[in-house]
Image (cartoon, helix red, strand yellow):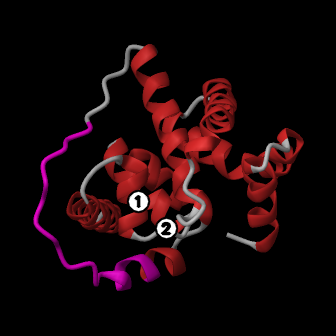
Amino acid sequence: MGDNDKELLGRCLAGDNDAFGGIVDAYQDRIYSFALRLLKDPAAAEEAAQGAFVKAFGALHSYNIAQPFSPWLFRIAHNACMDALRAGGKTVSMDTEDFPDLPDGERRVDETVSDALDAERIEALLASLPLIYSEALLLQYREDLGPAEIARVMGVPEGTVKARLFRGRELIKEKLSSNATV
């Protein structure tokens, strides 16, 4: 969290409601982009993002300033997206099985994907993954969150996040190798 974010949060927590506008300005594009990738509908993403900020404002008193702000806000956005998916009649598989810790050392695959593909193709690959994998990968690579922070956002154990990251990368690798042989 930058110094400006800390200052704005401090002002908000001290009762300066206008300072929350600065937080919205700082995070609105990231939250909307996150919601759009999960919901794949601009209107639903906008509504979920707005709802997330409204909920965050109402729950700001419960925010622990000693914790990073971004995962707290993304958790609220995650919940807003899951609510939107459920309200739209889409089923959301949010398995909560605690997977054993899997090795997280397959960075080479991600570097290869990033180097070999353009942004549009990467977006298409991520969009083709089941939500539980694409969300974890988006939070790690787009928002630069670690497994512990992603676990807080998604409301699952850290081992589950590591498993989802591993499986998501494996699915991408499979999709890339099946496209390469065609």
Mark found first going from the N terminus, 2 or 1: 2
The quadrant of the image that shows the N terminus is: bottom right
Say whether residue 149 is left or right of residue 52: left
**Residue 123 in the image: x percent, y percent?**
53, 54
Query: What separation in Å lies between label 2 and label 1 (alpha carbons)?
Result: 6 Å
Residue ID for mark 1: 150
Q: Say which of 65 and 77 sits in front.
A: 65
**Residue 14 in the image: x percent, y percent?**
78, 50
Give the mark count.
2
Q: Is residue 33 above or below residue 122?
A: above
Residue ID for mark 2: 145
Does the residue at mark 2 contact the one at mark 1 (Cβ under 8 Å)? yes
Q: Say which of 104 and 111 sits in front.
A: 104
Say whether residue 36 is left or right of residue 38: right
How dense is the environment of label 1, judged by Cα within 10 Å: few (below 14), some, or many (20 and up)? Answer: many
Q: Amino acid at mark 2?
A: Leu
